[in-house]
């Protein structure tokens, strides 16, 4: 069990690193891809020039992060189970569902990007329609996995709070960002609030990682 705790702690720290890496690229080199005023032709030109970096970006953001979650969720469950078994179990179900959706997002995004690049040279109009469809699908999946992630973090933090398993400030912080993710996902007009969950998850993962790596007292 102690080995799982350590593995979960390391996975939590790596998960935080994947988000930092993804946000860093999105805010710098790959920033133009998120520009709503960028025309489709310019978007494809940029994508073709940076396709290897975009593939790496997606792979770290989805696959590496997903692997980390697959280790972290059961490790966190083992830590929370003795003091809050039912709540820890429900939280873990949402955590595993989130993990599955993260992998799904990665597969669709990477394969969709490859299909988009291949189609663009043959049928630009069809490629533009494909991009619109991909954006709609990935937006829906990303919103769903943010909802699941918010439930997992919020409920796991509540379980840790009740069982005094984690430091109180970390539990309260986790419940707050979980609530922000739920509100931002459920209310389209408040979508900006949901991004607080993504940023807050970095800090929550880092805190949870340190707690899991430390020996239980």
Image: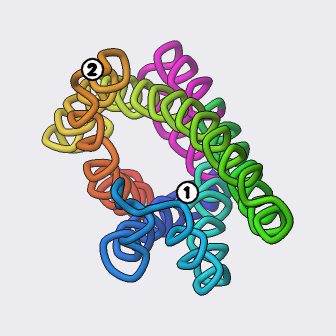
Residues tagged 1 and 2 counted as in contact (Cβ below 8 A): no
Label 2: which residue? 183
Magenta extent? 70-96
Residue sitting at the far left: 169
Q: Is residue 85 left or right of residue 205?
A: right
Residue 33: x %, y % from top left: 45, 66
Q: Is residue 48 left or right of residue 90?
A: right
Who is closer to the viewer here, 110 or 35?
Answer: 35
Residue at point 47%, 59% (across, down): 12
Answer whether residue 56 is magenta in the image. Answer: no
Residue at point 26%, 49% (across, down): 200
Which quarter of the figure has residue 97?
top right
Position of residue 126 relative to residue 145, above or below, is below
Label 1: which residue? 8
Are there few (<14), some (14-19), or many (20+) residues within 10 Å of tag 2?
some
* SS state under label 2: helix
């Amino acid at each position: 069990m102690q080995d799982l705790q350590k593995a979960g702690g390391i996975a939590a720290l790596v998960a935080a690193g994947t988000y930092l890496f993804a946000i860093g690229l999105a805010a710098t080199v790959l920033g133009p891809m998120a520009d709503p005023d960028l025309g489709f032709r310019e978007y494809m030109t940029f994508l073709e020039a940076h396709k290897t970096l975009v593939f790496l970006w997606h792979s770290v953001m989805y696959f590496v992060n997903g692997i980390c979650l697959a280790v972290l969720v059961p490790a966190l469950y083992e830590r929370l189970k003795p003091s809050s078994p039912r709540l820890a179990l429900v939280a873990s179900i949402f955590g595993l569902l989130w993990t599955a959706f993260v992998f799904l997002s990665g597969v669709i995004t990477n394969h969709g990007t490859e299909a988009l690049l291949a189609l663009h040279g043959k049928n630009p109009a069809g490629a533009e329609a494909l991009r619109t469809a991909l954006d709609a699908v990935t937006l829906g999946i990303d919103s769903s996995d943010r909802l699941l992630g918010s439930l997992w973090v919020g409920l796991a933090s509540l379980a840790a709070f009740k069982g005094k398993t984690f430091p109180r400030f970390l539990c309260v912080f986790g419940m707050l960002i979980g609530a922000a993710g739920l509100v931002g996902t459920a209310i389209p007009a408040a979508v900006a609030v949901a991004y607080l969950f993504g940023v807050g998850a970095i800090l929550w993962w880092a805190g949870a990682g340190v707690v899991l790596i430390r020996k239980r007292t």
